[in-house]
Amino acid sequence: QVQLVESGGGLMQPGGSLRLSCAASGIIYGVGDMAWYRQAPGKQRELVATISSYRSTNYADSVKGRFTLSRDNVKNTVYLVMNSLKPEDTAVYYCSAALMATRGTWSTYWGQGTQVTVSS
């Protein structure tokens, strides 16, 4: 069974750092673009950052300069390092990835979400 497994969320004080991980598991023939989204209470899900299979990255303006996205193509894992955290970063963070679980067919998969709370 192909799935994305997230880890690394939690409670952090403003100004602190957290690292989120998302690993794709199962029989996978290819991993394409990977991304993190977040959804705060009462708000729509928003894109935080994306990374291509060639490690080209894009970030939402709200996190530029503070968050860094990277990936390990051997481990099929993406990492989101979040520095200088602010209370407005509080949200459930979701990992997303384009995976080839069936030869020749790409599908988008989502993780279960991990809570990040920034509060003093």
Image (cartoon, rainbow, N blue to C red):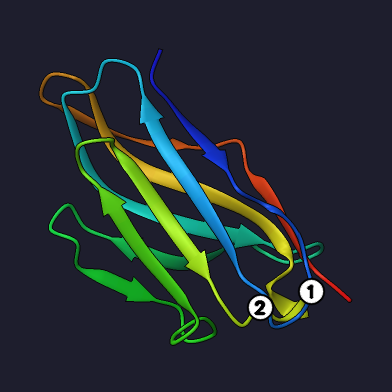
Quadrant, the N terminus: top left
Q: Residue furthest right?
A: 120
Q: Which residue is mark 2?
A: 85
Q: Quadrant of residue 38?
A: bottom right
- Name the residue: 39% across, 76% down: 59
For residue 64, the mark is: none
**Label 2–label 1 contact, CB within 8 A:** yes
Mark 2 is on which residue type? Leu
Question: Is residue 110 shown above or below 43?
Answer: above
Neighbours of disc 2 within 10 Å: few (<14), some (14-19), many (20+)? many
Q: Which residue is mark 1?
A: 13
- Name the residue: 52% across, 59% down: 37
- Name the residue: 41% across, 54% down: 79
Quadrant, the C terminus: bottom right
Question: Residue 54 at what x, y percent from top left?
Answer: 12, 58
Question: Is residue 42 shown above or below 100?
Answer: below
Question: Residue 119 at what x, y percent from top left?
Answer: 85, 73
Mark 1 is on which residue type? Gln
